[in-house]
Image (cartoon, helix red, strand yellow):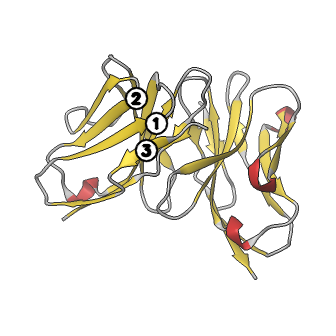
Amino acid sequence: GAVVSQHPSRVICKSGTSVKIECRSLDFQATTMFWYRQFPKQSLMLMATSNEGSKATYEQGVEKDKFLINHASLTLSTLTVTSAHPEDSSFYICSARGVNYGYTFGSGTRLTVV
Amino acid sequence: AQSVTQPDIHITVSEGASLELRCNYSYGATPYLFWYVQSPGQGLQLLLKYFSGDTLVQGIKGFEAEFKRSQSSFNLRKPSVHWSDAAEYFCAVGPTDKLIFGTGTRLQVFP
């Protein structure tokens, strides 16, 4: 079956630094990848959609300059949280979709900014 | 506006009891409907999905869901709950390019 690997699973960083999260489709080509943010005990909020080789499309209210998304290949997308602050602490989940594949989710990344 | 409502925030059942998790949606066109399960600190696992055809959909782990267009509902059911089913359950509706999630229902299972 389709597998999406997301790394790291947990990261703690200092306020003001940047953090990169990787999302890889292991056994299929992901034409589209999605990045979600999930606050404790809440649902998933779509942050942005990225198509391979194109600029990401951000949802309303999501800061493009803070959450940099790169989808340079059909198997890899990255989310970089720039100049992170404590309010950016959250659970980030990626999802990948390819031809003949539905939405497959990564295992998530718990980001804590101290 | 497109939306998904899961009226029950938290449900507690005894092991072996039946389960029904409710999901109502608002969507302009024919919806694609999904149920996902999330264990603590984990990503989401697809339980089942409905695109078209038979309105009763069978999924993994003994779950099923029924699409009722007249009620705009897609409720998830399981005849006998196991302790390992304790988790957060999300209903989602989508077009082909993105999913809209409900707020989730936390299932607690007592032995």
B3 relative to B41, above or below: above
Res A21 → quadrant = top left
Instruction: Specify few, some or many for label 3: CA neighbours under 10 Å numbering under 14, 14-19, or 20 or more.
Output: many
In the rendering, at what x and y percent does residue A112 appear? 27, 61
Asked if marks 1 and 3 touch (Cβ < 8 Å), the reply is: yes
Q: Nearer the viewer, residue A8 or B34?
A: A8
Whole-angstrom CA distance, mark 1 to mark 3, is 7 Å
User: How many marks can you see?
Assistant: 3
Q: Quadrant of the N terminus of chain A?
A: top right
The residue under label 1 is: A26
Q: Earlier in the sequence, mark 1 or mark 3?
A: 3
In the rendering, at what x and y percent does residue A42 appear? 50, 57
In the rendering, at what x and y percent does residue B10 appear? 65, 67
Identify which amino acid the numbered label 3 is placed on: Ser
The residue under label 2 is: A75
Asked if marks 2 and 3 touch (Cβ < 8 Å), the reply is: no
Residue furthest bottom in the image: B111
Asked if marks 1 and 2 touch (Cβ < 8 Å), the reply is: yes
Left or right, A79 with respect to A45, comes to: left
Residue at 48 percent across and 41 percent down: it is: A4
Q: Secondary structure at mark 1?
A: loop
Q: Which mark is residue A5?
A: 3
